[in-house]
Amino acid sequence: MAMPTAAELEAARERLLPDVLPGPDDPALRVLFCGINPGLVSAATGHHFARPGNRFWPVLHDSGFTPRLLRPDEQGELPGWGLGITNMAARPTARADELSDAELLEGGEVLRALVERLRPSWLAVVGMGAYRTAFADRGALVGAQEPALGATRIWVLPNPSGLNAHWSRATLTEEFARLRAAAF
């Protein structure tokens, strides 16, 4: 995948990135992954977790969610495995810390409505800080959360961004695998 130009990245600030959700012929949604918000590369390309160095796709495969390593432009295959992707906040930014708490709180409300409509078995929030803000749970840690959203259980995962150096690919894989074991 060719990297977008500086002008394309700047223009991406005005784009919305569609969710990856199941269609009528797909299996039931087992896990809905929720990123913090689209990065500029993702918004420019139209593909979630598209920035080189983001470890989402390798970790998704390494943890057993997908039978092979997908490229971001193959995100449309996820619903066939009972997986989907959305974001907490819709506004694309270069860094997640450009979002305000108000945007995350509003995004949390939109996310709750989406979960109520789709009823996935698990909501996997990929980013502990975003979860803590959007769900007003400052003490949340990685792993299963209480309470659930109706019948949907919540799991918080570390952010797989290459900027999150506290988590290696191996430790990210372990956490994603814990969720997979609970979900499947």
Image (tube, grey):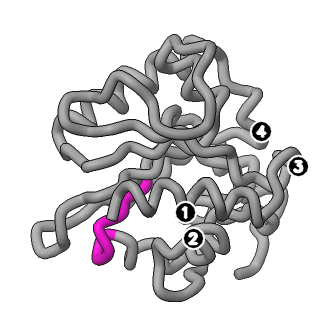
Instruction: Please tell me in which quadrant of the rendered image residue 62 appears.
Output: bottom right
On residue 165, the disc is: 3
SS at circle 4: loop
Q: Mark 2 highlights which residue?
A: 63
Residue at 25 percent across and 49 percent down: it is: 120
Q: Please give the range of residues in magenta.
A: 79-85
Residue 27's spot in the image, x, y percent?
18, 70
69 relative to 90, above or below: below
Residue 133's spot in the image, x, y percent?
58, 17
Judging depth in this view, the residue of 20 and 131 nearest the camera is 131
Q: Identity of the amino acid at label 4? A: Arg
SS at circle 3: loop
Few, some or many residues within 10 Å of mark 1 (<14, 14–19, 20+): some
Q: Does the magenta stretch include residue 114?
A: no
Q: Identity of the amino acid at label 3? A: Ala
Residue at 60 percent across and 80 percent down: it is: 71
Give the Cα separation between the discs numbered 3 and 4. 15 Å
Judging depth in this view, the residue of 146 and 115 nearest the camera is 146
Going from N to C along the chain, the mark reached first, 2 or 1, is: 2
Going from N to C along the chain, the mark reached first, 1 or 3, is: 3
Does residue 46 appear in the picture of this structure? Answer: yes
Q: Do the residues labelled 1 and 3 touch (CB within 8 Å)?
A: no
Give the Cα separation between the discs numbered 2 and 3. 19 Å
Give the Cα separation between the discs numbered 2 and 1. 5 Å
Few, some or many residues within 10 Å of mark 2 (<14, 14–19, 20+): many
